[in-house]
Amino acid sequence: MNSGYALLADLIVIFHLFYVVFVVGGQLAIFVGLILNRAFIRNPAFRICHLVAVTIVAVEASIGLFCPLTLWEYDLRQSAGQTVDRDISFIGRLARFVIFYDLPAWVFTVLYISFGLLVILTFVLVPPRLSKRK
């Protein structure tokens, strides 16, 4: 077993987890910020990065592409002599437990596209603003 490949696979799945947290948590933060009237939800850099991150996932799902992060992790695990179901570190297992579910592929496609449409709608209804400087 090559521990270098295993470590890289763990780093990929941790990055993948952060990506999911940014996408889902970002939308939740926008809703909460809207309710609490917080200015950060209008930050153009945050909102554009969030929109791009969600759009990438929705487009991949709509054209039937597998997530490149998932494929890269699988390849690294295979190179390390690991299987995704076992032989991986606690951190790798924990991250995978949070982001991967055993559901039909069409469910994820519908979820990703629906979530993408929600983010676009939020972007239009609660648009980002450039800060007013004095």
Image (cartoon, helix red, strand yellow):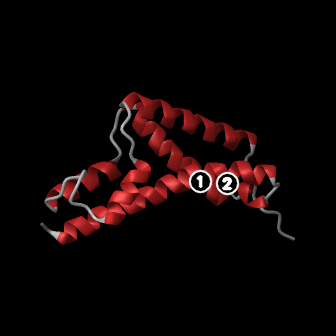
- Asked whether residue 128 is in view, the answer is no
Instruction: Tell me whether circle 1 and circle 2 mark residues in contact (CB < 8 Å).
Output: yes
**Residue 94 placement: quadrant:** bottom left
Specify the label residue 96 is tagged with. none
**Residue 55 or 115: which is nearer the viewer?**
115
Q: Pinpoint residue 60: horizontal percent, then vertical percent.
A: 40, 39
Q: Nearer the viewer, residue 74 or 99?
A: 99
Name the residue located 44 percent from the left edge and 52 percent from the top edge: 98
Drawn side of residue 105 relative to residue 20, left or right: left
User: Residue 107 lies in what quarter of the image?
Assistant: top left
Residue 124 location, x and y as percent?
70, 40
Residue at (82%, 54%) from the top-left corner?
A: 37
Residue carrying label 1: 25
Q: Is residue 47 above or below residue 9?
A: above
Mark 2 lies on residue:
29
Identify which amino acid the numbered label 1 is placed on: Gly
SS for dot 1: helix
Residue ID at (28%, 65%): 89
On the rendered structure, is 78 left or right of 118?
Answer: left
Give the residue type at disc 2. Answer: Ala
**On screen, 57 above or below 133?**
above
Task: Check the image and report above or below for 16 versus 104.
Answer: below
User: Where in the figure is residue 17, as x and y percent of width and height?
Assistant: 44, 57
Circle 2 crowding by C-alpha within 10 Å: few under 14, some 14–19, many from 20: some
Q: Is residue 2 left or right of residue 90?
A: left
Tell me where residue 11 appears, x and y as whole percent.
34, 66
Residue, x 45% and y 37% (percent of image)? 59
Q: Report the quarter where the N terminus lies.
A: bottom left
Secondary structure beneath dot 2 equals: helix
Q: Is residue 108 visible?
A: yes
